[in-house]
Amino acid sequence: GRNERSCINCGAGSFWGVYMQAQQRISAGFAAAVMAMDGQRKAPSSQNPLSPTSIQEVFNIPKLLHPDIYDVNENRFCSIYKTHGKVMDPYYKRFPLKSWNLWANDHEGFDELERRARFMFNRWWALRVCFQSVYGFRPKALKLKAIDMYKQINDAIAQASRSARALEDIRNLVVPTLYDQLKGEAQRMRAAGREVEWKLVKEPSLSDVELVNGYMAKAVENAEVPIKLRFVQWTVAITSEQSFAVYEKVPKSGARRLVAGDPNQVLKVVDHWVLERPIFKAWVIPRTGPQGAAWRLLARLAVPDEPPKPKVNETQQ
């Protein structure tokens, strides 16, 4: 009767209250259940594909854990969007403040503080999203993954100047657009008769890897239906010691001559790589993500030595 239905509503409300995004669908499901018990249930409108038709659809655990398999819309978007395709928030290193007057030199100091605050907020936001949405996420595991990818990808790029099949081993470690770019660069190196020798003198440790910026982007900004698919991007600063040299074959003799770098010189290098992973945004229950979801290299950033100049619009000009 009325008391029984009120107990059901109270119990469900106390348990599912944590699912902020599912409140509307849960309320619609309970309303449909009450109408069914009273013999007044009506068929859902065909114009609203999101209207739940039963309690089982609302509390569909497989659909909550694996939306890419059991949800038609998520499956369609996951099959189309494998990567976001671009770096959403390029990282700039910290520059010292030249003056206490933040508005001097076209607001240079104010812009620097704004970038620092934005990157800090981005890191906090991305950490919260990853902890809540990615099953088994830990910053330490991400750093270890970045170190392993750093060694494999750099070694494959150096080997690709001699073998066309060297990049096949890292196809799953980089996004398709970057893979095609690396493949084109390797073809031009081989066509010019140049070979690259790269050696990691000192492997980076966990203390040499820093998560400097994070960002989460929607797969589609204006989707016709709400979807959970997102892309998380982490900018990782990796410090290492390595040697680098480029050789070129002499046409007549076939001997090699050094054209760039020095194999005997050890360089301290700081690279900024952007790693990307598709996720399903969640509030409480973390998921493994779409099938085959993994961290991949999206871009290798060339961080400038000078801060970006403020953009001047036409009215200011």
Image (spheres, grey):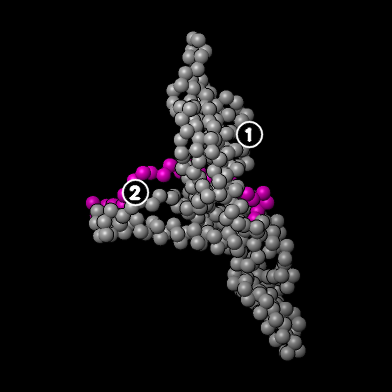
Identify the amino acid type marked 2: Pro
Residue 287 vertical position relative to residue 58 in the rendered view, above or below: above
Residue at 59 percent of width and 70 percent of height: 21
The earlier-in-sequence mark between 2 and 1 is 1
Chain part drawn in magenta: 289-317
| Whole-percent x, y for residue 217 in the image | 52, 56
Identify the amino acid type marked 1: Glu
Residue 57 vertical position relative to residue 311 in the rendered view, above or below: below
Q: Write down the residue under mark 1.
A: 168
Graded by Cα atoms within 10 Å as few (under 14), some (14 to 19) or many (20 or more), the crowding at tag 1 reads: few
Q: CA distance from mark 2 to mark 1?
A: 37 Å
Q: Is residue 140 visible?
A: yes
Question: Considering depth in this image, is 145 or 64 the residue closer to the camera?
Answer: 145
Say whether residue 62 is left or right of residue 239. Answer: right
Residue at 49 percent of width and 58 percent of height: 123
| Quarter location, residue 6 | bottom right
Residue 229 vertical position relative to residue 16 in the rendered view, above or below: above
Residue at 24 percent of width and 53 percent of height: 105
Instruction: Give the quarter of the figure containing the N terminus.
Output: bottom right
Mark number, residue 307: 2
| Whole-percent x, y for residue 218 in the image | 53, 57
Most common secondary structure along the magenta stretch: loop
Residue at 50 percent of width and 38 percent of height: 241
Residue 105 vertical position relative to residue 261 in the rendered view, above or below: below
249 part of magenta stretch:
no
292 part of magenta stretch:
yes
